[in-house]
Image: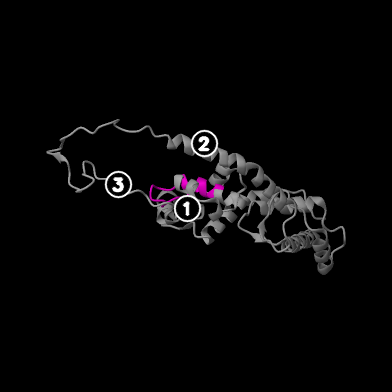
Amino acid sequence: MSWALALPKASLENPAARHVLLCLANYAGSDGRGAFPSALTLSEDTGLSERTVRLKLDELEKAGFITEGNQAIAAAYIDRRDRRPVVYDLQLKRGANAAPRKERGADDRTGCSSQQNGVQENAERGAAAAPNTSLNHQLTEEQQLQRELAEEIANQERAAAECPSPNQRFAMFAAWQPDAKSLADQIAIAGLPDDAIPDAAIRKFKGFFVAKPGKVESSAGWCYQLVQWVRRERVEAAGKGEAPDFNDTSWAEDMGGL
């Protein structure tokens, strides 16, 4: 994590992406390789939604801060392929170069060992080791960063939930409401009555797709999916001589394998 904290803010301006990178660094080895926390784990660590975590991981990969690593590492721990998170390697070359490690007992000028038969010839002067204050500084810096990020991240998520841009593709989320014009257009195209989409239908539709974060659509695309889904429900119910029951939650029984 010290490498990620040392990154200049100018090189990674997005605070949410920086937060995800900091937490991802906690799961990497000393060489920055082999980090494979799940999106749920990073969501719990950062306080961001899983959807936002996935978006920020994509941004970090495109910007070259992380790359996909050896996926066999996750396979060694998790048998089911569909449950394995992506293994990432952090690109440490973006951070400061590690200081060269001095051989124990090596002379600064000659590189030769000053030990004979495993015994140090001369005792070193001064304290054996200086107190390490970098850890306390690092924790303080991390906590400060988290405090600074918290409000901005919350504002970003609220803004995205309340008003996603028309062309933005996003996974379904609980606060989503269909755009009135896009929904009206799709209802007219499908030849459905104006009141064909009750609130119960929207709740049922969201409940199904919130559980499928891998599917993304634009705002208009979700309106299209909603209208087509309601249309199928109406046709299926009509075939049974019934009205569609949008309060039925039996569909959730099939979601256990997702």
Name the residue that disc number 1 marks.
80
Q: Are marks 3 and 2 in contact (CB under 8 Å)?
A: no
Q: Are marks 2 and 1 in contact (CB under 8 Å)?
A: no
Residue type at mark 3 is Arg
Residue stretch rendered in magenta on the structure: 19-37
Q: Residues within 10 Å of mark 2 (few under 14, many from 20)?
A: few
Q: In terms of sequence position, does the residue under pointer 3 or pointer 2 come before the other? A: 3
Residue displayed at 44% across by 36% down: 135
Residue type at mark 2 is Thr
Q: Which mark is residue 101?
A: 3
Residue displayed at 81% across by 67% down: 190
Q: Which corner quadrant of the image does residue 134 belong to?
A: top left
Q: Nearer the viewer, residue 44 or 190?
A: 44
Q: In terms of sequence position, does the residue under pointer 3 or pointer 1 come before the other? A: 1
Q: Nearer the viewer, residue 212 or 67?
A: 67
- Figure check: 1 above or below 131: below
Horizontal side, residue 177 vs residue 7: left or right: right
Question: What distance separates the C-alpha of mark 3 from that of mark 2?
Answer: 27 Å
Horizontal side, residue 116 vs residue 95: left or right: left
- The kind of secondary structure the magenta stretch mainly shows is loop
Name the residue that disc number 2 marks.
140
Residue type at mark 1 is Arg
In the image, is residue 35 part of the stretch drawn in magenta?
yes
Q: Nearer the viewer, residue 145 or 244?
A: 145
